[in-house]
Amino acid sequence: MDSIGKYQIVKELGHGATSTVYLALDSFNDQQVALKLFNPDVLQHSSSGKAFRRLLQTEASLAGKLSHPHIVKIHDAVLEGDVNYMVMEYVEGETLEHFGEVDHLLTLERVAEIIYKCCKALEYAQSQGVIHRDIKPANILIQGESDIRISDFGAAMLENQQTTQVSGVGSPAYMSPEQITEKPLSHQADIYSLGVTMYRLLTGRLPFEAANNYSMIYQILNIDPPPPSTYRPEIPAALDAIVSRALCKDIAHRYQTWDDFARDLVSFISNDVPQQEEIFDTEKFDIVRALPFFKDFNDVELWEVLRISEWHKIHPNESIIQEGEEGTSFFIIAEGEVRVLKQGRLLSLLHHGDCFGEMAHYAEKDAKRSTDVVTRTEVTLIEIDPQVLALASYDCRFRFSEAFLRILVKRLAVANTRLSRLLSDQKDEQM
């Protein structure tokens, strides 16, 4: 098979009972994609084909609706006639299934970071009126150490959807009590399923081990699972508590919001993970969301900021930029304080949330720095190369332009105040 529709087939990536997935080339957009070709026998099966097609139509309807860096993008879908397929973003990686095995477990901080990103992605999906309903390791792709994408939204429940939902979807071991008993669902069903996923990634086991689905369902409805530290003693009480709250059978005691879940993960990384030079994406996202510079950026744009930026930890009294040197990068202070100097004289002190070097963003090529900038305390810096920013999305670039404009207005106001004071002092001296 050389092509399917307008897509050129490169190679097969994998296959199962319902579909075969290919790496394909979209020559029009010059990008690689994952093309999932569905087995016609499954779609034509009288008893299950109609329900399966409805699941596919649900997922296809999300094309263009969910645009988030941690959700697999759906580019195209053809669900008519004899050839039925879906075209998705190609993620060069594997699912988290591999890391839910006892001999392939990730470090505690990596698990926390991955679950945090899932929280933020599913929070975004909720804001778009979408509940996934089938969160599990097999539906979360990982690229590199912790760059994740949530996939397979076929079981998703859409707010205000006119068609009747297909019941009984989802994997029993990851289902919440309310999903098993077919009660009305909210995002808290996904919170429960992500709690089960977190338990599996931490321990290599499910919260409930059962010989069959009936036993599994009984335990989910009636028994509290042992804490993860039972199987992995180095797990601290803080992580046990997070998992326990996510897995509460009573939704009144389960996490009420994704942000509550995410903030507990940030607290764990900040308080229970030993300090190190590496800054986790979990910490980065929490930092940028709190900085005034990024106050108008939405979550999707903030994740893009993390993708295009470099972060540095710098000790006190170290030079960041020097007067006269060439350079175009600009910097935002995430933590700490720096001194701005002109020929050795102090011009100003800049604190967390302040920006410097941004004029190079608008200057001609080979612009020279006009001041020295030296750290006063230990500093965490966000560095952004204008050439990399130029490749970012229009929305992200627009937010930066707005932020720079606010800075310019603020600095002009300060300059006007200083000038007014200077003129007033001169007038007083003349009198």
Image (cartoon, helix red, strand yellow):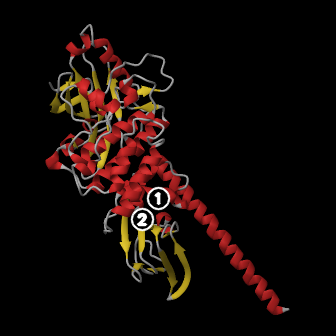
Q: Residue at x 32, y 15 (%)?
A: 51
Q: What residue is shown with label 2? A: 382
Please say if 386 is above or below 199. Answer: below
Dividing the picture into quarters, in which one does residue 189 lie?
A: top left
**Residue 273 location (% of width, % of height):** 32, 62
Give the alpha-carbon distance from disc 1 to disc 2, as whole Å.
9 Å
Q: Nearer the viewer, residue 102 or 225?
A: 225
Name the quadrant of the C terminus: bottom right
Say which of marks 1 and 2 sits in front. 1
Q: Crowdedness of circle 2 by 10 Å Cα count: few (<14), some, many (20+)?
A: many
Residue 201 visible from this viewpoint: yes
**Residue 297 location (% of width, % of height):** 51, 51
**Residue 295 location (% of width, % of height):** 55, 55
Dot label at residue 221: none
Tell me the element at label 1: helix
Q: Residue at x 42, y 80 (%)?
A: 322
Left or right of 341, for residue 106: left
Q: Crowdedness of circle 1 by 10 Å Cα count: few (<14), some, many (20+)?
A: many
Please say if 48 is above or below 120. Answer: above
CB atoms at circles 1 and 2 under 8 Å apart? yes
Residue 328 visible from this viewpoint: no
Furthest residue in direction right, as rendered = 431
Q: Residue at x 26, y 51 (%)?
A: 229
What amino acid type should be assigned to the residue bearing mark 2?
Ile
> First in sequence: mark 1 or mark 2?
1
Name the quadrant of the N terminus: top left
Q: What residue is shown with label 1? A: 288
What amino acid type should be assigned to the residue bearing mark 1?
Val
Left or right of 56, for residue 158: right
